[in-house]
Amino acid sequence: MLPLTVQHAAEMATVLADPALHAFIGGEPLDEDALRDRYTRLAAGSPDPAVSWFNWVISVRDEGRLAGTVQATIAHEGPVAEVAWVVGTPWQGRGVATEAARGLVAWLREAGVRTVVAHIHPDHAASAAVAASAGLFPTDVRQDGEIRWTTPPEPPPRRQAQPGALHEDG
């Protein structure tokens, strides 16, 4: 995964050009100019200081090409991250999204995120498989017709006891 930049717009417009990618999420493919505008907004960061945006492009090492994106929106209270991924049609079914989603969840956990959430259309079996592989579980919660998937929350880090911190006298 590489941090998303505006310069990725030209290649990503081709990667994301298949209208089938929007079957479950709605909308339509963006052309290079619209994608450049979107990436400019994403690179500027969240206007809400209580929220951070992280966006990456997925690079397929052995091909030297971009294949998709992953993103995380972290609400600092909690902290909770909402994640999403999309992989271009030619790279689907090859484990690209699974590897990226696993890496994203691991990175978020290392960064102190306690709960990771994804919203997945109930008929999108491939995305559900990616979520499950990344350690998320479906819940009974629906939002805009999608199923909320989540990791079990991690407990806050435990402080290690320091020698002499506890005394017999209290």
Image: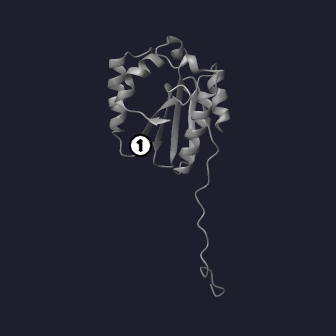
Q: Position of residue 88 (x, y in %)?
A: 53, 20
Q: Which residue is at 53% across, 16% downward?
A: 21
Q: Which residue is at 46% across, 36% downward?
A: 2
Residue furthest to the top in view is 19
In the image, residue 49 sits, relative to residue 162, either above or below, namely above
At label 1, counting other C-alpha atoms closer than 10 Å, the crowd grade (few under 14, some 14-19, many 20 or more) is some
Which secondary structure lies at badge 1? strand
In the image, residue 33 sits, relative to residue 52, either above or below, namely above
Q: Nearer the viewer, residue 11 or 75?
A: 11
Question: At label 1, which amino acid type do we have?
Answer: Val
Q: Position of residue 64 (x, y in %)?
A: 50, 27
Q: How is the image coloured?
A: one colour
Q: Position of residue 31 (x, y in %)?
A: 37, 15
Mark 1, residue position: 51
In the image, residue 50 sits, relative to residue 148, either above or below, namely below
Q: Which residue is at 66% across, 86% downward?
A: 168
Please state, as top left, top right, bottom left or bottom right, where the C terminus lies in the image. Answer: bottom right
Q: Judge left or right: residue 3 versus residue 166.
A: left
Q: Position of residue 160 (x, y in %)?
A: 61, 69
